[in-house]
Amino acid sequence: MHLLHQRGPLHDLPDDPAAYDAVLAGVTETALARMTPEGSLENPAAGDDIGDTSLGITSLLALAWHRTKDPRLPEAVRRSLAFHLRSRVYTEDNPGYPNLTARDTGLPYARYVLEAGAHPIGDWPSTVWALLQAVNVLDAADGLVEEEQYRELLRVAGGYWRWLTEATVFNPQDAANQAIGCVVGGLMLARHLPSEEGGPVRQRALRLYADEIRARRVRDRGAPLPPEHGGAYDNNYGPISLSFLAQAHRVSGEEVFAEDGETLARYIDARVCGSGFDIGGPRYSEQHSAFESVLGLRYFGHRIGADIGRYAGDARWARHAVGADGGVDGHFAFMLVWQIQDTTGWHRTQSAAPARHQLRSGTVTVSFDDRMTPAVIEAGGTVLIAAAVNRQHGFGPVTDGFLLCRPMGAVRVADQRAGGLAAKLVTKPVVGRDHVLRQVRSLYVTDGTRLWTTVVVERLDGERYLLAGMPYVTADGDRLRRVGDFPLVAAAGGLRLTHPPQDEPDSFDARSELTQQQAAFALAADPRGYGDPDAGWRHVRTTSALEAGPAPDAPEGLDVFAVRYGPADSGRLDLVCERTEEGLVVRTESFTAVLGEADEHGEPRLTLTTART
């Protein structure tokens, strides 16, 4: 079973002018064949996300005309624009819409579902999208749209902006991608207005960004992030926010959008595996956007010098939104327009700068969560995610069923590189059921192909082992395939792969066809698409898990756990751990690491040498 929404790195999609012309040519033929006598370009299979879609296709046709001068397009643009202005601009309040702050304003808005009162909750983002489609048509109107239609569209776009910012609660779904999109719409609209009107619109957009978005950022892994649906980051919507930040910087030149985009881009770089896999979010754990992310990933990957285009997107939406019947849909068309207009090239090499929340080299990745516990480990082409025992999730030592990975105090980190090796030492104080404060030292060393993990802790009582992750997906060509086994691990103290009973609703067996996201939604408080899968996943009591026993011959008073992830032909793991005057020495067949005493500021000391030296 393959993951549905993570199908391959987005930077693998051709993005040269000829490729985009081919995309627009396909859109053109589909649109001209679909256009109804009334001028609608909507996908007939669509039932929601519909109020802006015909106008979105219109904007693509307008862009195509400027690139090709296809004589069929001017009439199609005018007819479809007339359809939107006549049939998709609503000025009467939608019955049941809960977010109005002023009633009967007569301001125009776009509906998420066309039938009055059917499902009005999505009207705010649908109106943001309609505003963005409208300003793209306005940008392309020269020589194509007649003056009267242009003036009418400009009036409606101004009305959309006022409805979004005056007649309703701003950002009612707490979704930064929608809110930043609204700001972008205001910035682009302002350029079409006389200065005495456009200036205040621009300033209002900038104030909304500062007061309603930037001031409400949420920290995760040390980074202040625009929140998505109540959480700090969502795999589907986070990179979409990055694209909106890119467009905001492109059209306004305001440095704040560049600064915040670079922060978000570095965060994405730190959490995403080399294969592009990522997991977690308050709206979707595994669902990834595709073309909607390209602009931001390409623009900011270039700015920060990192290959964030490796992000594995949904190739079914590789160029534009796709309707229920598989046909082109105008929703998110504005992103394709901007993606074509921006000529920034992909940055395809890894960033050389150490990142606190990631260790990455070659095909090996360790991405750490906010507590500096691995969130995912990728080695040998396979990804492991945090396992669970007794409703405790993570990687770390377990004693009598209690997982020691939640810090009780400052977490310290040291990075070191030597002779093709990269290492990270994480030290954290933890408290067990016995209320004893212990220091857990976790050393991660990689040569770009293999990953050695060594965990040292004061001697534990009872049954003890290292929870070393849950095998989850593996690379299968340009796709990610579910796995339930992982033979590519060696352990100094023995290793076992355990699975929970399959008939327990709060357990997760990696051998089943159920995905993590599906299991998480089943345990979430609200229906799929509205519930918080991260919160649902926290209810999982136990999962499949790799468990490594303590290594033999550990120094007195210590437990040492050691595993090596990587190719199956890596051989056995030989590890020696001993105390010396310099500190605790960890020696394997490939390196020697010295975990020295903390410095005068309490920071850990790490020395790394290759076996050759």
Image (cartoon, grey):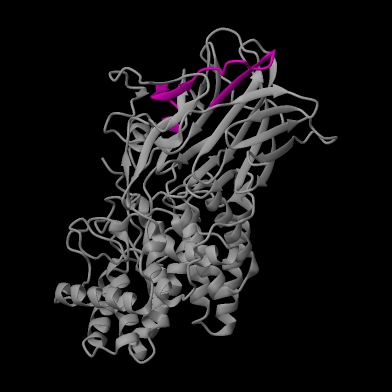
Task: Decide if residue 436 is on the left or right side of residue 387.
Answer: right
* Residue 75, position as x, y percentages in the image: 23, 86
Q: Quadrant of residue 333?
A: bottom left
| Residue 362 visible here | yes
Is 259 magenta? The answer is no
Is residue 433 placed above or below 482 in the rendered structure?
A: above
Q: Residue at x 69, y 13 (%)?
A: 557
| Residue 532 visible here | no
Q: Quadrant of residue 511?
A: top left
* Residue 394, position as x, y percentages in the image: 51, 28
Front-most of residues 283 and 187: 283
Task: Decide if residue 227 is on the left or right side of residue 341.
Answer: right
Task: Decide if residue 241 is on the left or right side of residue 65.
Answer: right
Q: Residue at x 29, y 52 (%)?
A: 117
Front-most of residues 344 and 361: 361
* Residue 607, position as x, y percentages in the image: 72, 38
Query: What residue occupies the far top of the structure in this picture?
Result: 462
Q: Quadrant of the C terminus?
A: top right
Is 539 magenta? The answer is yes
* Residue 473, position as x, y percentages in the image: 36, 39
Query: What residue occupies the far front of the structure in this picture?
Result: 612
Is residue 140 placed above or below 6 in the rendered structure?
A: below
Front-most of residues 331 and 110: 331
Is residue 435 placed above or below 6 in the rendered structure?
A: above
> What segment carries the magenta color?
533-562
